[in-house]
Image (cartoon, helix red, strand yellow):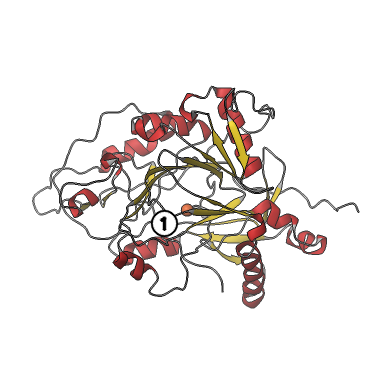
Amino acid sequence: MATQTITQTEIAPSVSISAQSLPERPLPESVAKVEQVKEETKEQPAEPGKEKPKVRRVIDEEGGTTTATYPHYLPVWNHGEEYPPWEPFTHTEHGKDADPSFKDLLIDGAKIQHLTPTTGSEVTGVQLSRLSEAGKDQLALLVAQRKVVAFRDQDLADLSIQEALDFGGYFGRHHVHPTSGNPEGYPEIHLVYRNGSSSEFESFLANRNSSVAWHSDVTYEEQPPGTTFLVILDTPEVGGDTAFVNHVEAYNRLSPAIKERLHGLTAVHSGFEQAEFSRSRGGVVRREPVKNSHPLVRTHPATGEKALFVNGGFTRSIDGLKKEESEYLLKFLLDHIGRGIDYQARVRWAPKTVVVWDNRVTSHSAIVDWVTGERRHLARITPQAERPYETPYVAETK
Ligand SMILES: [Fe+2]
């Protein structure tokens, strides 16, 4: 079967440290619950006979000093953090009813260049952190239409982490990743981190031929992410690109007969393997894993487009089908998505780039192809969106 377990971040060792005060910060409503839990579970002095929670910090692994450009974004894993199951929330889709002229987003001096006809764009001359509400609404719509948009020369990484979160929180409730590292005190930021050493590269490829691992992020959640942000902090000069595939176009390429058959089917998305992978390596599992069934074809609330909603990271089986049938159909769909280079786009990172994608209608893969020892360090802001829904199949007119 073509599914792969996505581990999100794969870095190692662990150290113990004493409690440190977390940065003072206001409590945005959307994360108040997380903050409350964090406050209850954050590292406390050990009671006699009780061990303090283990905390791993990359800064310690690097010997207490670092050449990272943004040291306060280096990953930390706190084994003392535990979060309750997510409560459903009402998502507001800001791309819906946004002005399609994009006049508040693509302001004077802005340039947009499409990477391919259907998928991906690159924008210069826009500062995301300074967008008005209308501009943010149009950002959500543009990203829904283009699936992925790279914005160059951004200041998001230079603002405080809280300011970056406040910006991203406009688009939905912040997801807190169950297993990944985060900047200390900010569990809502998911970090992607590799030091780029040749040993890391070799171990990554020890049991696979290619680093390509198509996935959409955390689709096991009842309300998976929508408009999603990745902020580059350090990048190899060459290498470490991220590739995206357009699931609307993947759906559009199917024959009417297959499209019609897929409608009404749902598939299981599971976070159990990711949690197990983390546990097996002594990592954190901050929230117990969940499975959710989602439609195989979902409709985007802003564009009305239909997209295949399966991915190699988390989709495990198709409800109601027997094992062989489910595996066969899933393999076909995942192969179709993975090989569709004519509806994929590859984004090259550069310092101060922010990439925004719509996680509802894409999957992506990092490309691990550099052995220069350069660090690849990114921060993801991951607003959750609506529970995936489908609208009926519409017969195509000739
Ligand atoms: Fe991802």
Q: Can residue 384 be seen in this view?
A: no
Give the class, few, some or many, for how many residues have Cα within 10 Å of label 1's Cα (few <14, many ≥20): many
Residue 284, image x and y in percent? 31, 56
Residue 376 left/right relative to 331? left
**Rendered-image quadrant of the C terminus:** bottom right
Q: In which quadrant of the rendered view does residue 103 lie?
A: top right
Q: Is residue 251 above or below residue 123?
A: below
The reply to whether the residue tagged 1 has its Cβ within 8 angstroms of ligand 1 is: yes
Residue 85, image x and y in percent? 43, 48
**Rendered-image quadrant of the N terminus:** bottom right
Residue 91, image x and y in percent? 57, 36
Residue type at tag 1: Gln
Dot 1 lies on which element?
loop
Residue at 21%, 47% in the rendered image: 66
Residue at 38%, 65% in the rendered image: 276
Q: Name the residue under label 1.
A: 8
In this view of the protein, which residue sits in the foreground, 389 or 191? Answer: 191
In this view of the protein, which residue sits in the foreground, 202 or 72? Answer: 202
Residue 54 left/right relative to 6? left
Residue 308, image x and y in percent? 66, 56
Q: Is residue 223 visible?
A: yes
